[in-house]
Image: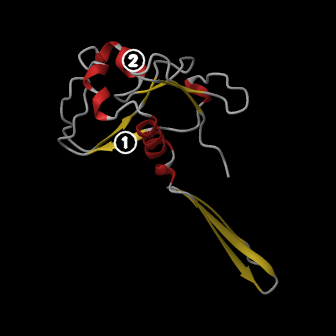
């Protein structure tokens, strides 16, 4: 089974400060830059959902990227309340951690749920289908989210 991503969660000074999440190489533990990440963290916003830094509602359905970085060389951070990097970012100065810490945001379960929801769940899983004919495998199909890989062999 492929590994979607790996993170290091740092609870230093919790709960005066929220935990920090770093995306890392699963073998070395080295922090990954945006260009090295394979997972995308996107959530679908419906009209009326708070979307902007000050809670402005989305006007129409849109996808919101939750990994923030300003270039491929930057270290991305997960842009969600309850994450240290979110609360320290200039766009969220009015959204203090102390407003969120009593709501469960920043707890390990909340972080894991959101990492799974936006980083893994959208992949929908790998669903192999193999078509076997009398003289062996005739074709196969792999569905991975919205990507499909198919092969059909028709003997001459």
152 is higher (above) or lower (below) than 74: below
Q: Which residue is tagged 1?
A: 43
Q: Position of residue 155 (x, y in %)?
A: 79, 79
Local secondary structure at mark 1: strand
Residue toward you, 61 or 48: 48
Answer with left or right where residue 101 lies relative to residue 13: left
Would you place residue 146 above or below residue 26 in this image? below
Rendering quarter of residue 127: bottom right
- In this rendering, is residue 41 above or below 9? below
Q: Residue at x 42, y 20 (%)?
A: 84
User: Which label's residue is closer to the chain start, 1 or 2?
Assistant: 2
Q: How is the image coloured?
A: secondary structure
Considering the image in quadrants, where does the C terminus appear?
bottom right
Numbered marks: total: 2
Q: Disc 2 designates what residue?
A: 17
User: Which quarter of the picture shows residue 19?
Assistant: top left
Residue 99 on image: x %, y %: 25, 23
Q: Is residue 156 visible?
A: no
Q: Residues within 10 Å of mark 1 (few under 14, many from 20)?
A: some
């Amino acid at each position: 089974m492929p590994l979607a991503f790996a993170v290091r969660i740092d609870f230093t000074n919790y709960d005066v400060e929220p935990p920090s999440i770093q995306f890392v190489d699963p073998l070395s533990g080295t922090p990954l830059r945006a260009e090295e990440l394979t997972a995308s963290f996107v959530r679908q916003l419906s009209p009326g959902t708070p979307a902007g830094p000050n809670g402005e509602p989305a006007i129409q359905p849109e996808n919101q990227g939750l990994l923030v970085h300003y270039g491929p060389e930057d270290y991305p951070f997960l842009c969600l309340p309850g994450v240290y990097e979110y609360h320290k970012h200039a766009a969220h100065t009015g959204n203090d951690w102390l407003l969120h810490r009593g709501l469960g945001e920043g707890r390990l379960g909340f972080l894991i749920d959101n990492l799974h929801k936006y980083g893994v769940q959208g992949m929908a899983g790998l669903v192999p289908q193999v078509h076997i004919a009398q003289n062996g495998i005739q074709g196969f199909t792999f569905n991975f989210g919205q990507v499909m890989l198919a092969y059909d062999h028709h003997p001459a």
